[in-house]
Image (spheres, rainbow, N blue to C red):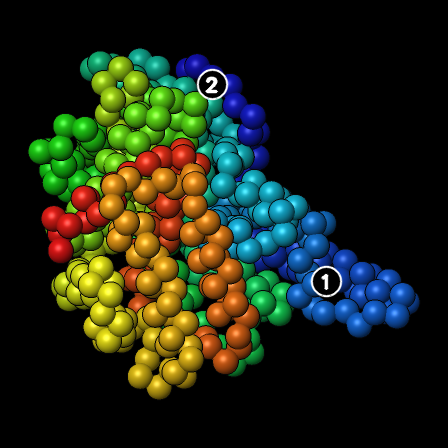
């Protein structure tokens, strides 16, 4: 057994429901106490405090981030999604604190890891390996990854799920939702029940590593004709519901290519954007997790390595065609056709106020700007992301408009946003019109 250096540290994962509930209770009590103290201080200064302002303080954000990082599981996963989706809307200090949830998580001590592996592989599991790195090479919200060499010569990455993750998904989601309600960030009349149910379903799917293994194999088959991409091979003999075994893939994180030549950055983002549209229109199936860590780059071959297929999702049969109609209408500047396509998809309803419909259509037309202009779109030299953010925040602040679209579209939007963020970070220049035209 060998070790691997990392900045994270070994902390046992709280796996019992009562233990996790107690941690949420303690977190809520600490935040409530902090809010009460802050409120008293503001009242003493003659101010009328708002619940949202009392909750969204750096101290409370740090408490939430630290506790979710310790708990891991669905609690941390939901926190990651919130921080990724709302990060640009938070004050910089809060965004910086919550971004810690997207960095490496703490990892299981060896004793806890050994119990998980013994449960899945049997007590003599170590006899199958010539080397097994006890210190993980990566740790995330619901599992950690170890490098291992089998006695028959395979170089593997072994993803091991934290104990108790599946049992705690439903309660973790409910407890994080309770913290959101407590913040005052959600309108009292908004029914987020369907969204919570879908989040639970998605997390239960991600926590099934046998399911992920099947999608890993499917994507490998679908991309067999694309030599620019590499998908790790699945090793089914070592894969269970709690353990996923695949080829270990060398490479550097794609988001580290900020100093690479412009040509390299442009090519990599062109490949990833092309894959995104191929997933939507050709595969009708998408890996919907936009985490940058899911992409690695091989400088020697120029290939992009694709990792983590737990959030893979198949679309309903009519959805790709609906988006094809929407994008074609956008390129044709046909607002009536855009409105009909948005209605068909479900971004707003027939009874949605006319001015809210206009705002949504305006936002869509804004998002089409990179596809309309000829030649390469320069992700670094434009203010589109800021304009979209401002428009979205203004719409979200209008409590008269709260509409939850179909969940498929939300997951797809998250992936589009994540790829856009990566392209912006890499300051890439990509001819988006050339990529999309073949699908329309």
In x, y percent, where is residue 180? 57, 64
**Residue found at x 20% / y 15%:** 152
Could you tell me which quadrant the C terminus lies in? bottom left
In x, y percent, where is residue 119? 36, 37
Q: Nearer the viewer, residue 307 or 347?
A: 347
The image quarter containing residue 241 is top left
**Residue found at x 15% / y 50%:** 437
Q: Nearer the viewer, residue 260 or 5?
A: 260
315 to the left or right of 307: left
Regarding residue 38, the answer to whether it shows in the image is: yes
In x, y percent, where is residue 84? 47, 49
Real-space CA distance between mark 2 and mark 1, rounded to the nearest whole angstrom: 41 Å
**Residue found at x 44% / y 58%:** 388
Q: Nearer the viewer, residue 89 or 42?
A: 89
Could you tell me which quadrant the N terminus lies in? top left
Q: Residues within 10 Å of mark 1 (few under 14, many from 20)?
A: many
Disc 1 target residue: 54
Disc 2 target residue: 4
Task: Of the two numbered discs 2 and 1 on the same chain, state the one appearing first in sequence.
Answer: 2
Residue at the front extreme, as displayed: 374
298 over 246 or under it: above or below = above
Frontmost of labels 2 and 1 is 1
């Amino acid at each position: 057994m060998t070790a691997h250096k990392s900045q994270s540290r070994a902390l046992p994962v709280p796996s019992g429901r009562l233990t996790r509930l107690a941690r949420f209770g303690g977190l809520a009590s600490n935040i409530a106490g902090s809010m009460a103290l802050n409120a008293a201080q503001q009242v003493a200064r003659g101010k009328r405090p708002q619940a949202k302002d009392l909750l969204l303080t750096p101290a409370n954000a740090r408490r939430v981030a630290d506790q979710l990082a310790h708990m891991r599981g669905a609690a941390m996963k939901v926190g990651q999604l919130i921080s990724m989706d709302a990060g640009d809307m938070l004050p910089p200090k809060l965004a910086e604190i919550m971004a810690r949830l997207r960095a490496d998580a703490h990892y299981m001590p060896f004793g806890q890891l050994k119990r998980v592996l013994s449960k899945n592989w049997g007590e003599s599991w170590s006899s199958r390996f010539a080397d097994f790195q006890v210190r993980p090479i990566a740790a995330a919200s619901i599992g950690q990854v170890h490098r291992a060499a089998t006695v028959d010569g395979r170089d593997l990455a072994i993803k091991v799920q934290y104990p108790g993750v599946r049992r705690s998904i439903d309660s973790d989601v409910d407890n994080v939702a309770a913290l959101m309600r407590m913040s005052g960030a959600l309108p009292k009349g908004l029914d987020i029940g369907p969204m919570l149910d879908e989040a639970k379903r998605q997390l239960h799917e991600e926590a099934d590593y046998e399911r992920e293994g099947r999608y890993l194999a499917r994507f490998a088959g679908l991309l067999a004709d694309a030599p620019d991409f590499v998908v790790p091979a699945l090793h089914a003999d070592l894969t269970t519901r709690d353990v996923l075994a695949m080829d270990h893939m060398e490479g550097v994180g794609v988001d580290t290519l900020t100093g690479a030549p412009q040509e390299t950055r442009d090519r990599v983002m062109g490949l990833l954007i092309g894959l995104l549209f191929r997933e939507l229109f050709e595969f009708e199936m998408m890996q919907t997790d936009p985490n940058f860590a899911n992409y690695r780059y091989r400088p020697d071959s120029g290939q992009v390595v694709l990792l983590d297929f737990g959030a893979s999702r198949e679309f309903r049969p009519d959805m790709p065609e609906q988006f094809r109609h929407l994008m074609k209408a956008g390129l044709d500047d046909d607002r009536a056709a855009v409105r009909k396509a948005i209605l068909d998809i479900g971004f707003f309803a027939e009874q949605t106020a006319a001015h809210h419909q206009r705002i949504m259509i305006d936002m869509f037309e804004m998002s089409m700007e990179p596809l309309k202009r000829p030649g390469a779109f320069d992700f670094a030299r434009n203010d589109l992301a800021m304009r979209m953010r401002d428009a979205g925040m203004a719409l979200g602040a209008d409590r008269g408009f709260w509409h939850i679209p179909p969940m498929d579209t939300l997951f797809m939007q998250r992936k589009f946003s994540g790829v856009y963020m990566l392209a912006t970070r890499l300051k890439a220049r990509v001819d988006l019109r050339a990529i999309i035209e073949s699908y329309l």
